[in-house]
Amino acid sequence: MTAGGVTLAQRPERIVSLGPSATEMLFAIGAGPQVVAVDDQSTYPADAPKTDLSGFKPNAEAIAAKNPDLVVATDDLNKIVDQLGKLKIPVLLVPAAKVLDDTYREIDELGRLTGHQTEATALTDRMRTQIDKIVKGVPARPSKLTYYYELDPALYTATSKTFIGSVLGLFSLENVADPSDADGSKGGYPQLSPEALIKANPDLIFLADTKCCQQSPATVKARKGWSAVTAVQKDQIVSLDDDIASRWGPRVVDLVQSVADAVSKVPA
């Protein structure tokens, strides 16, 4: 079994996942029974074996104590790949997706490496079909809607060059944050000023900080000066599930549906 530069002699039966998106992918392709431990941020599915392992500060000894025959990580922090390599523990990296094709590729890699290729192919085919149907089901508009995507109340946001930006781009929406990181120096995640945001006057506001920061349409409406924003005036503020909105696994279909519902409600 070979995928992502990793070769295994046999199907792994003790998998450790160090990332929420990786965990969701593994369970979605039927590899859940092979997963013996997941990191402290893996909240879905509910029956995933959550531990105090950290994906942000991975500890080789703590991971090795789980006796894994495969570790799936989303980043090579603390040079964990080398550290675990010295312990003869293989690591598959499934880094943050930049576009949907990255998600499909990672699901395929996990399927091949865990012995669930058929299930992985079925999952990606299903995701493609569902997303295509959802996008095509949204009526065409005479002009593009603009939007602001909020990561936290300090007005950090994501541009069109990010994964989330590519997902919203499926609906031909215009991102008001793009001019704030035109040269890409902020990695696609600039911080806007309240003045700039109000001036940009987005038609839609998507809140991806409802869980972490308790933001809601009501808290947005209460912000000073925001009453002049079209999205506020027309009640076009969309509350998203933080977890679904920040991950690039199978539940991206749910995110696409949420965006479709919001766009469809805006009068042409």
Image (tube, helix red, strand yellow):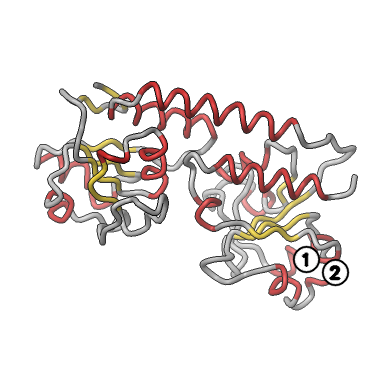
* Residue 169 occupies quadrant: top right
| Amino acid, disc 2 | Ala
Q: Residue visible at 73% across and 64% down?
A: 196
Quick one: 184 or 241, which is closer to the camera? 241
| Label drawn at residue 65 | none
Q: Going by the image, does 33 lie left or right of 107?
A: left
Q: Going by the image, does 220 lie left or right of 181?
A: right
Q: Which x, y percent locates residue 10?
A: 17, 24
Q: Which quadrant is home to the C terminus?
A: top right
Secondary structure at badge 1 equals helix
Quick one: 103 or 180, which is closer to the camera? 103
Q: Which x, y percent locates residue 222?
A: 74, 77
Q: Residue visible at 40% across and 56% down?
A: 43
Q: Residue visible at 31% across and 44% down?
A: 73
- Marks 2 and 1 in Cβ contact (< 8 Å): yes
Q: Which x, y percent locates residue 72?
A: 29, 41
Q: Going by the image, does 45 lie left or right of 56?
A: right
Q: Going by the image, does 219 lie left or right of 99?
A: right
Q: Is 241 placed above or below 88 here?
A: below
Residue that lies at the very extreme toward the left in this rendered image:
87
Residue underneath mark 1: 198
* Residue 152 occupies quadrant: bottom right
Secondary structure at badge 2 equals helix
Packing grade of label 1 (10 A; few <14, some 14-19, many >=20) is some
Residue underneath mark 2: 228
